[in-house]
Image (cartoon, grey):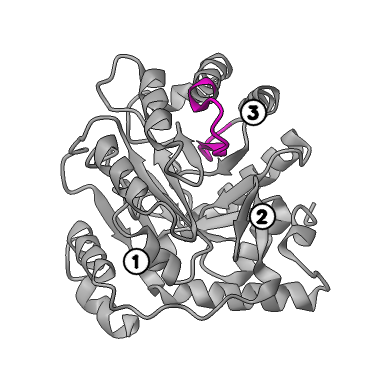
Amino acid sequence: MFAALRPLLFTLDPERAHALTLIALRSGLLPAAAPDDPILRTSLAGLDLPNPIGLAAGFDKNAEVPDAMLRLGFGFVEAGTVTPLPQAGNPRPRIFRLVEERAVINRLGFNNAGLEAAALKLRHRAGRPGVVGANIGANKDTVDRAADYVAGVRACAAAASYLTVNISSPNTPGLRALQDRAALGDLVARVLEARGSVATPVFVKVAPDLMPAEIDDIARVALDLGLDGLIVSNTTLGRDGVTSTEAGGLSGAPLFALSTAILRSFRTATGGALPLIGVGGVSSGEQAYTKLRAGASAVQLYTALIYEGPGVVQRIKRELAELLRRDGFGSIAAVVGTGG
């Protein structure tokens, strides 16, 4: 069905097409996915996942359709990025399809309806099955970015399955400076203090545009302060493999090699002692398998949905299960980090 609809969707502005997709998902008319192959069940930072294929942040910014995405077959879903105050984001146009390269450039700028609205939706789904995380960010004009993250933690810690501290979007000026060792240490300490006694895991999402020393610094802060994991990685400012010069973060197929190399570096820097989620360019079981072997305990995707539709999730899981059995692995956990 998606193959027939894609030409029509691609005649629309990307944001309009996305809004129509959310309407379809809210309708509840899309069929539920078949039960997962048991070999795909795994755990991540204490979270029980039916499969390791997650929906990356950005698709469901305001936590409108997490349960619909779980029904489509995702093992976990990440809503957001959400900021304390609602904000419109950057001027349009701000999303650009690079069809030949199977990529997207976006400069959205954390457009969302605000923390209160998202937290309310997350609280309303309390008691439902499925792992749904909240990706939290800072408002563009805030004077204390760490305080914005603290507000996100306090609002969502009890309602979300996990929290992701997004300090790696390239579309909020100065945000990536929070990846500096001193700034990151202060931020993580404040976020973990705000979490208090709630057992909700906290991850930090990092950029792919990092130098080796920066990777080592981030890994050391994460290990020393007791983060529950890292998400590797966000979109890139690089333009390898594409001809577009539009400003913003690049996602999709051209990001796969870079994001996987950075993932492997974080696996080495953390010594395998910290759960990692691999993101960037995943659109096949083979690519998910490569991320797992590079050190990811789970993977996330978004851009692949734009080009292949919701059926890509079931295909990736089927291919991944076949690869595990082909190579004699009995579980997801057994393959993590085996790729050197």
Q: Which residue is mark 1?
A: 99
Image coordinates of residue 214 in percent, x first then y, are 61, 26
Image coordinates of residue 238 in percent, x first then y, are 45, 42
Looking at the image, is mark 3 or mark 1 earlier in the sequence? 1
Image coordinates of residue 98 in percent, x first then y, are 34, 60
- Name the outermost residue toward the right: 328
Give me the C-alpha separation between circle 3 and circle 2: 20 Å
Looking at the image, is mark 2 or mark 1 earlier in the sequence? 2
Circle 3 crowding by C-alpha within 10 Å: few under 14, some 14–19, many from 20: many
In this view, the residue in front, 309 or 239, is 309
Q: Closer to the camera: disc 2 or disc 1?
A: 2
Mark 3 in CB contact with mark 2 (< 8 angstroms): no
Q: Which residue is mark 2?
A: 43
In this view, the residue in front, 187 or 174, is 187
Residues shaded magenta? 193-210
Looking at the image, is mark 3 or mark 2 earlier in the sequence? 2
The mark found on residue 222 in the picture is 3
